């Protein structure tokens, strides 16, 4: 049951933001940014509009997922590539 102190997000019903502690992150505001990106259909639009000239042979993440991660990282104020190494352990960014 969702209460006033607990809210489920639309893009992932298993994700609930609450005020009871749990796995803490200072970047939980990115949940709202991700909700906005989802409302604007960021990923389908980026697939339609953005073309990557990339010849990677071995990869784990698509370029469009990397683009979304980069946008979230910049919005959060992490402007350097070295921040991505630290952020890979952030519980909010792992979920998003």
Image (spheres, helix red, strand yellow):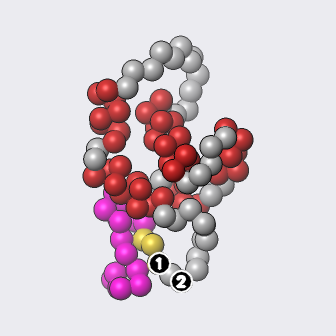
Q: Which mark is residue 37?
A: none
The answer to whether residue 5 is magenta is: yes
State the image coordinates of residue 80 (x, y, percent, origin top left): 67, 41
Height in image: 70 above or below 4?
above
Quadrant in which the N terminus appears: bottom left
State the image coordinates of residue 27 (x, y, percent, origin top left): 56, 62
Height in image: 57 above or below 72?
above
Which secondary structure lies at badge 1?
A: strand
Which secondary structure lies at badge 2?
A: loop
Q: Is residue 21 left or right of residue 37?
A: right
> Principal SS element in the magenta part?
loop
Q: Residue at x 28, y 52 (%)?
A: 39
Q: Residue at x 48, y 15 (%)?
A: 53
**Residue under label 1:** 18
The answer to whether residue 24 is magenta is: no
- Provide the residue span drawn in magenta: 1-15
Disc 2 and disc 1 in contact, CB within 8 angstroms: yes
User: In the rendered image, which quarter is residue 44 located in?
Assistant: top left
Height in image: 58 above or below 7?
above
State the image coordinates of residue 6 (x, y, percent, origin top left): 40, 80
Q: Which mark is residue 20?
A: 2
Q: Residue at x 42, y 66 (%)?
A: 15
């Amino acid at each position: 049951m969702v209460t006033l102190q607990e809210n489920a997000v639309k893009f992932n019903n298993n994700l609930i933001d609450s005020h009871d502690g749990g796995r803490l992150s200072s970047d939980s505001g990115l949940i709202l940014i991700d909700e906005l990106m989802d409302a604007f259909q960021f990923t389908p639009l980026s697939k339609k509009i953005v073309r990557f000239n990339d010849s990677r042979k071995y990869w784990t993440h698509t370029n469009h997922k990397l683009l979304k991660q980069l946008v979230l990282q910049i919005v959060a104020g992490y402007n350097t590539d070295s921040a991505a190494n630290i952020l890979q352990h952030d519980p909010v960014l792992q979920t998003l």
